[in-house]
Amino acid sequence: MVSNNNNNNVINNDNQISDFGIVKKDANTWQIPKKGAMNVPAVVYASDILMANIKQDKTISQIVNVAQLPGIVKNALAMPDAHQGYGFPIGGVAAFRQKDGVISPGGVGFDINCGVRMIKTNLTVEDMMPKKREIINTMFANVPAGLGGKANVRFTEEETIEVLEKGAKWAIKQGFGWKEDTDRMEENGYMKADPNDISARAIARGKPQLGSLGAGNHFLEIQSVDKIIDEKTSNAFGVTKKGQIVLMVHCGSRGLGHQVASEYIRKMEDKYGFAGLLDRELINAPISSDLGVAYYSAMSGAANYAWSNRQMITHWIRESFEKVFGRTAKDMEMSIIYDVCHNVAKMENHVVDGEKMNVCVHRKGATRSFGPGRIEIPEIYRAYGQPVIIPGSMGTASYLLRGTKKAEELSFGSTAHGAGRVMSRFAAVKKFRSETVASELESKGIMIKSASWKGIVEEAPQVYKDIDEVVRVSHDAGLGSLVARMVPMGVIKG
Amino acid sequence: MIEMKKYEYFEHTADAKFKAYGKNLEDAFSNSALAVFDIMVNTNLVEPKIKKEIKITGKNKESLLFDFLDELLFFLDTENFVLHKVENMKITRKKGAYELKATILGDKINKKYEVSGIVKAITYNEMEIAKKDGVWVITAVVDR
């Protein structure tokens, strides 16, 4: 647990709880009833254990602030892994009416379309064991990682603009992947975007970084399937047996997305000012305003960049496996299981108080979790619900879930996105030593390769919430149903 | 006299919060830049091989700081530039707007410097620029 010594930064939890009047509705549901300037109630999905974490920072006050934004419908929501962000909490979900609602870059996050992709193989733990070191080293050489990690390929400004327009299919056209790859991604790896809404400065930041993992909590992991919980669904998703090797990629839109977010926050501030805002980072624009429309378009372009980025990385993973195992990627059945975005806003149809409406759903550190039948789900999975990928922290388990009808009723079809931090990076660096963290992982049979040793400490497993508890609450609350559990064998960290 | 601390970091679960100090506004701005880069690299060890002159304008002190730090992140992403120090900073006020001129010294990321983590963006979250007891104090949170 993080001890917070800086008084400036600590809110008085006792006051907070009595002020907000949190009501525990059931084992995993907490409600802050609508009062004062709140347009809707706020709801937190958490167990007692997770709630104890959530109450330690500003998550609750942030979600109450979100509940006061114009045009918000039903509830402002916090997912089981929620923690303090800027403006919106991370793990925050909010939906806004088209006619009088708002769109907020702070409700999406700086790393637009940060997301997770899962790739399957037909290899087993036995196949992997003798080759593990070699494959990790090969992937580390092929996939640029870390700060200043040089991209393998150089692109022109024109090509970068094409990426913003076309998304994953651009990368596939360039030879990075298989035609059918886009069938297994949210939005098929593409959202409609006008590159003119993205500044030359953002494009300049994105150009040298296209096709790189980045730093921070981004990673590429070799995992083995440890437990199959829902056999029928896992078979449909391509996870068929215990000991099967799968891969997980976690990254986003790099400096391009960060720049888009920064610039639109700035533009909205210039246009609307801070007056009446509870928090500067809640800055927003009406969905249908010129600025709202332009941000959505720019955000979509950044999302396209992120999909292309993960697509290129997928290609290099396949190439690395081909080199090390001496078989083709097709022969190793290395198709994509799914690709989820967990920092994004989307226009979606939902039923609100019995009325069908199109709303702008913000998911900031939350994963879409649509139930069976939704048209947005690829046809091959539609009968089962959308695959939901929830990675753990470095060295802990990750989970595959499926979306549910109940999630659509409760949370606009959303659930958690990961473990969620409980300790700041500074505190982690003070508390742990990289050698200890790495040797603890090695002793569990997890090989780690990082662009930076300090990065390993900052992402030590202990700085995150318990992923098992996060997915258990997700499952029990009905936000996402457990399908399979994977454990890491090797990690490449940015 | 005890030497003034250049900056210090504070707890913030997901992001990085710092306070930077200076006997004048220029020093506080320069120390903010060091606080941002020291998150990723030891700026003391970075060699001053690259020299850039920058000029930033802003409507107010906050937007001036935002754009100044954002400019440095831009050099980081586009040129792999890491900061060693800021020199000759001059902040002036002209016709109601602020102008900042400075020389920044640093180097390209290379194996000699251990770099880690990332500062994704500067934010206005909790940003404060104020003079307290004769000392300029800048509070800011950056997204990482």
Image: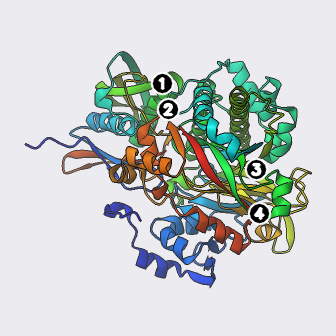
For marks 3 and 4, give the CA distance: 23 Å
Residue density around tag 1, few if under 14, some if 14–19, many if 20 or more, within 10 Å: some
Label 2 to label 3: alpha-carbon separation: 37 Å
- Label 2 with label 3: CB-CB less than 8 Å: no
Residue where numbered disc 4 is placed: A413
Q: Residues within 10 Å of mark 3 (few under 14, many from 20)?
A: some
Residue plotted at (42% across, 50% down) = A425
Left or right position of A365 against A315: left
CA–CA distance in space, label 4 to label 2: 34 Å
Task: Please name the amino acid that badge 4 sits on.
Answer: Gly
Q: Residues within 10 Å of mark 4 (few under 14, many from 20)?
A: many
Residue at x 52% of width, y 28% of height: B77
The answer, for residue A200, to whether it is visible in the render is no
Residue beneath disc 1:
B80
- Spot occupied by residue A428 in the image (x, y as percentages of width and height): 39, 52
Q: Of the two numbered discs 2 and 3 on the same chain, state the one appearing first in sequence.
A: 2
Against A294, residue A41 (above or below) is below
Is disc 3 placed on a helix, strand or loop?
A: loop
Q: CA distance from mark 3 to mark 1?
A: 38 Å
**Residue found 54% across the figure and 51% down from its top:** A395
| Count of marks, rendered view | 4
Query: Dots 2 and 1: beta carbons under 8 Å?
Result: yes
The quadrant of the picture occupied by the N terminus of chain A is bottom left
Name the outermost residue toward the left: B1
Pair 3/4: label in front: 4
Q: Which residue is mark 3?
A: A288
Which disc, if any, is residue A25? none
